[in-house]
Amino acid sequence: MSLISTNNLKLVLGGQIVLDGVSIAIERGEIVTIVGPNGSGKSSLLRALIGALKPAGGSITRAEGLRIGYVPQKLQIDATLPLTVQGFLNLPRRQDRAIVTSALNRAGVPDLAKRQMADLSGGQFQRVLLARALLNTPDILILDEATQGLDQPGAAAFYHQIEDVRRDMGCAVVMVSHDLHVVMAASDRVLCLNGHVCCEGTPEIVADAPEYRALFGTGTQGALALYRHEHTHSHDHTHKHEAP
């Protein structure tokens, strides 16, 4: 059974249909990236998957006992509030110290427990949000543009961390991203949304789809060339660069 699936899902916000006829399934251990233009329903779909948004039609099915970890797009914390990372991870209820330590290690920030939340860099803050999502050892990790506001090296490092988490914990990962080159390198499957599922499949299949090119233009060819180069280069050191 899939970890989570939707059947003909319809979502309505403020009287407007934001998604209609969406049927997807997320399997254990896969990394699925959702792409699409602004207003295409990406974040709304994630909110529905975690149970924060009620469907106006269709259905959502979750595996029994499914544990979900969620990393929001952003989180505002009062900068004047004296709150350490460990204190933040103990909200709303105290966690076993070993669980907190393990989550920070998995998120790649083992030394931040005693730091003030207000003193963290953007990248560190996102890693702490990731650690929070990992506290309950999730079966599926859902990230809503978790690298927004990070520079390219910071975003790449964050996505490498996500790949490590998937490998070590065996969880599925569903993420919304605008970093197309990262999508191509890190995803097993890509879903292209624009009020409905325009196309889906492996990164190469989606990048060649007319619907995807109509939304994102020919610039994605450079992303695909980079994807092909990175993956081929890891198996063949004599591989020559492809023209974008």
Image: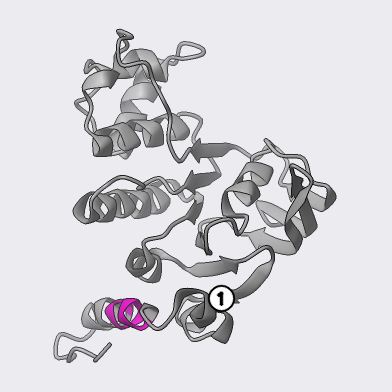
Say whether residue 181 is left or right of residue 217: left
- Residue at image position (67%, 35%) is 52
Image quarter of the N terminus: bottom right
Q: Give the residue at the far front of this rendering.
A: 15
Q: Residues within 10 Å of mark 1 (few under 14, many from 20)?
A: some
What is the three-letter code of the residue carrying label 1? Gly
Q: Is residue 174 above or below residue 127?
A: below
Q: Check disc 1 and report the residue beneath it.
A: 201
Q: Is residue 165 magenta?
A: no
Percent of width and height locating residue 26: 62, 58
Q: Is residue 224 magenta?
A: yes
Say whether residue 166 is left or right of residue 205: left
Number of marks present in the image shown: 1
Out of 189 and 209, give the one closest to the viewer: 209
Q: Is residue 103 above or below residue 210?
A: above
Q: Which residues are magenta?
A: 221-227
- Residue at image position (60%, 37%) is 67
Percent of width and height locating residue 50: 64, 40
Image quarter of the C terminus: bottom left
> Magenta-highlighted stretch: main secondary structure?
helix
Q: Give the residue at the far left of this rendering.
A: 238
User: Which of the 4 quarters of the picture holds residue 120?
Assistant: top left
Out of 109 and 97, give the one closest to the viewer: 109
Q: Is residue 93 above or below residue 222?
A: above
* Helix, strand or loop at mark 1: strand
Percent of width and height locating residue 170: 47, 51
Identify the coloring: one colour
Percent of width and height locating residue 167: 39, 54
- Residue at image position (35%, 21%) is 98
Q: Give the residue at the far top of this rendering.
A: 82
